[in-house]
Amino acid sequence: MENATTKAVNTAAQWQEKIIDYVVKNGPGLAGALIILVIGVLVARTLGNLLVRWLDKRHMEPPVKMLLSRIARLMVVAFSLVIAAGTCGINIAPLVAGIGVAGVGLGLAMQGVLSNLVCGLLIIFTKPFRIGEYVEIIGCYGQVNAIDLFTTVLVHPDRSRVIIPNRKIVGEVLHNYGGMRQHNITVGVSYDTNLPDALAIVNEVLAKNQHVLKDPAPIVAVGAFADSSIEILIRPWSLLTDFGPAAAEIKLAVVEAFRVRKIGIPFPQREVRVVNVQGLAP
């Protein structure tokens, strides 16, 4: 037990002597390396802030500004680390080679992440859609809330969010509705209805609604001939922010206007005839 303790004490003393010798011999180099690191961090921070201000004047997208500023800061810090390592007496060549090998391995391990990054930059620069527009892609739909470097966020009318990896968007069929949407409202009227009057009433309702856009003009037309009614198609446009309220207001106003003008909205019904009742009796 005493031998093991003595051996441990001797080993600690030897390491202490080595550290003291290293500090004595390379003290100026260590101090210079520390100063270089501090200056490098300050320069990286200043350069990043200046780059962000310069990109603001160029109206660059926020994700791109963030990426470029971070890359610039990392490059300055990495350069400072390399210089500091050389100042301390460390051989830089193996260090640079090791960093290169580690970078290749990291890139292979993060193929999916890098793919999202590249696709995110492609979306930002090509602008197939913008924040605030309504899109539908790969079975998902919603208003674009954010376009980040790795993901795109869509928001549903119920305030739920859909987060899509950018690599799932690039190369897919995209339906961009823009900043407005067209309503798809259908109302049925009886077969004895004066159709020109019914169409005129619907147009009056749409003209009075402040949430209905005048350009493009609403579409009101006769649609299908159903079993118990003639369907009238109501296809106005509204801004995304007004789409929900406009749909409810249009439906309510059309029903009230039809009731005032005595235009019936028939409900589905079936006529059942019983033939030869006596023959069915027991």
Image (cartoon, rainbow, N blue to C red):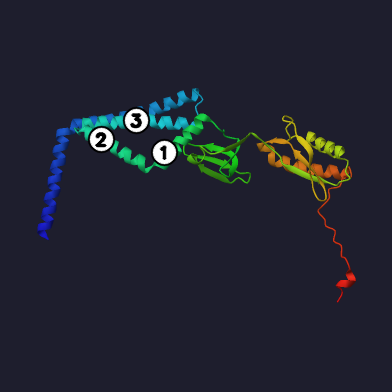
> On the image, which quarter does residue 274 sit in?
bottom right
- Which residue appears at 84% of the width and 36% of the height? 200
Whether residue 12 sits left or right of residue 101 in the image: it is left
Marks 3 and 2 sit apart, C-alpha to C-alpha, by 16 Å
Residue farthest left in this picture: 3
Task: Indicate the secondary structure of the residue bearing disc 2.
Answer: helix
Which numbered disc flags the more N-terminal residue, 1 or 3?
3
Quadrant of the image for the N terminus?
bottom left
Whether residue 246 sits left or right of residue 67 in the image: it is right
Residue 44 percent location from the top left of the image: 36, 29
Task: Indicate the secondary structure of the residue bearing disc 1.
Answer: helix
Whether residue 164 sits left or right of residue 230 in the image: it is left
Q: State if disc 1 and disc 2 touch (CB < 8 Å).
A: no
Asked if one can make out residue 30 in the rendered structure from this viewpoint, the answer is no
Q: State if disc 2 and disc 3 touch (CB < 8 Å).
A: no
The amino acid beneath tag 2 is: Ala
Which numbered disc flags the more N-terminal residue, 2 or 1?
2
Marks 2 and 1 sit apart, C-alpha to C-alpha, by 22 Å
Q: Is residue 148 above or below residue 262?
A: above
Count residues near mark 1 (Cα–Cα under 10 Å), then give few for <14, some for 14-19, many for 20+.
some
The dot on residue 97 is: 2
Residue 190 percent location from the top left of the image: 85, 47
- Which residue appears at 15% of the width and 35% of the height? 24
The dot on residue 75 is: 3
Residue 55 percent location from the top left of the image: 47, 25
Quadrant of the image for the C terminus?
bottom right
Which numbered disc flags the more N-terminal residue, 3 or 2?
3
- Which residue appears at 24% of the width and 35% of the height? 95
The residue beneath circle 1 is 114
> On the image, which quarter does residue 261 sit in?
top right
